[in-house]
Amino acid sequence: MIAAPIARIDFGLTIAARLAGEDVAKRIQLLIEYDPKPPFDAGSPEQAGAGLANDVVMRRKTLIDEAAEVARSAGAAFRRP
């Protein structure tokens, strides 16, 4: 049943907002791309807006750069004869 997991995510985001603030909860929602019926309208970069989306990207820049390097290495390994 899908309602239970969604309710748990909604509850988790609500708790995150109370503990760390609404901006933190919105960042979490955007990071997990949670967008079925979210408590905040920030489940995609388009909905979150450029400011919040850029903030999340900048906070995750190291991880994004590491993932890009892994992808490059994997691609190079597949191109080798």
Image (cartoon, rainbow, N blue to C red):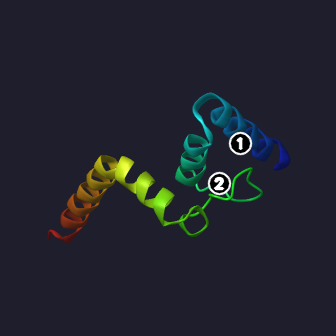
Numbered circle sitting on residue 59: none
Numbered circle sitting on residue 34: 2
Residue 59 horizontal/vertical position (percent): 37, 47
Give amino acid for label 1: Ile
- Residue 46 visible in this rendered orientation of the protein: yes
The foreground one among 40 and 44 is 40
Residue 7 in the figure: left or right of residue 49: right
Q: CA distance from mark 1 to mark 2?
A: 8 Å
* Disc 1, SS: helix
Residue 76 horizontal/vertical position (percent): 18, 65
Mark 1: few, some, or many residues within 10 Å (few <14, many ≥20)? Answer: some
Give amino acid for label 2: Tyr
* Disc 2, SS: loop
Q: Is residue 20 above or below residue 71?
A: above
Residue 6 horizontal/vertical position (percent): 77, 47
- Mark sitting earlier along the chain (1/2): 1
Q: Count the numbered circles shown.
A: 2
What residue is rendered at 60% in x and 36% in y? 21
The foreground one among 2 and 62 is 62
Judging by the rendered image, the residue that carries numbered circle 1 is 9
Does the CB distance between marks 1 and 2 fall below 8 Å? yes
What residue is rendered at 61% in x and 49% in y? 29
Q: Is residue 27 above or below residue 50?
A: above
Residue 55 in the figure: left or right of residue 32: left
- Residue 1 visible in this rendered orientation of the protein: no
